Amino acid sequence: MDGTPMSGASNAMSAIKPAILVVEDETGLVELLRYNLERAGFAVAVARDGEEAMTSIGESRPDLVLLDWMLPLMSGIEVCRQIRRDAGTANLPIIMLTARGEEGDRVRGLDAGADDYIAKPFSPTELISRIRAVLRRIRPALADQVLNYADLRMDLVAHRVARANKNVHLGPTEFRLLRHLLEHPGRVFSREQLLDAVWGKDVYVEARTVDVHIRRLRKALEPFKLEEMVQTVRGSGYRFSAAR
């Protein structure tokens, strides 16, 4: 990336796509999955073994994990169990992807905490449909074209935000910032996490830039009595929530 404004805009737009972590050690399959998932509108990260997967999840939380059963260093089953044991990742959607297609293996995968299970060989079209189905069920905000929180409505296609049918006027960055917060209501994000998600990981922006755009977002929401929903969590970052 050259860091030009156009590059930054492109990164910011791609960063708000649903993020899939592919945990798979077979290079050919990784490339097949990456191609089909990106073509379907997902952002893709890759981990080649179980330990790398846990590190990746700790550093940058994906929206869904596509997890192979047979992995170096740590099995997919153990990765799944560790994800479920951690309160911070306990609700992270997981689809197991494996050559082990027997009923007993499917039961083991689901018992370990997987939300769905698909056996190799598989149809990329079916896999993407299963991913979308899991996201609709577990993280509906990522599958819809409209985000709703209380009586606030964000139309992702028309790029409009309204409360009680009155338009909330936002700049492009404030729109992306509000979208990211609405997709994860109640979750606290550090400045660095918001920079990565809204501006893009390959664009250098100072952390205090987040504070500037948070103030702009609050100012835009103020006439609608919503500014207090954009909350500062001292020492941690920001969240969007109606709860105190």
Image (cartoon, helix red, strand yellow):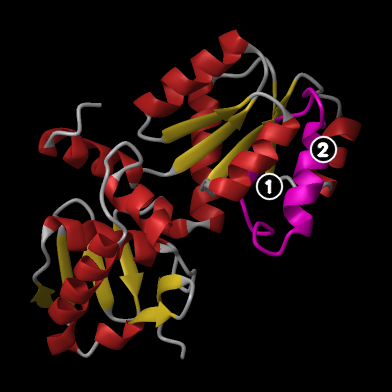
Question: Is residue 94 on the magenta stretch?
Answer: yes
Amino acid under label 2?
Ile
Can residue 95 be seen here? The reply is: no
Q: Name which residue lies at 50% across and 57% down.
A: 139
Q: How dense is the environment of label 1, judged by Cα within 10 Å: few (below 14), some, or many (20 and up)?
A: some
Horizontal placement of 182 versus 78: left or right? left
Mark 2 — residue? 77
What is the number of callouts on the image? 2
Mark 1 — residue? 115
Query: Between 243 and 123, which is closer to the camera in this rendering?
Result: 243
User: Residue 121: percent from the left, percent from the top?
Assistant: 66, 14
| Disc nearer the start of the sequence (2/1) | 2
Residue ranking furthest to the right:
104
Amino acid under label 1?
Asp
Query: Between 27 and 206, which is closer to the camera in this rendering?
Result: 206
Specify the quadrant that holds the N terminus. Answer: top left
Whether residue 32 is situated above or below residue 201 in the rendered picture: above
User: Residue 17: percent from the left, percent from the top?
Assistant: 36, 43
Quadrant assignment, res 104: top right
Horizontal placement of 17 versus 233: left or right? left
What is the spatial separation of the Cα atoms under label 2 and label 1, in whole angstroms? Answer: 12 Å
User: Residue 46: percent from the left, percent from the top?
Assistant: 55, 28
- Can you tell which mark lies on residue 78? none
Q: What residue range appears in magenta?
A: 68-95
Of badges 2 and 1, the one in the foreground is: 2
Q: Name which residue lies at 77% across and 24% down.
A: 71
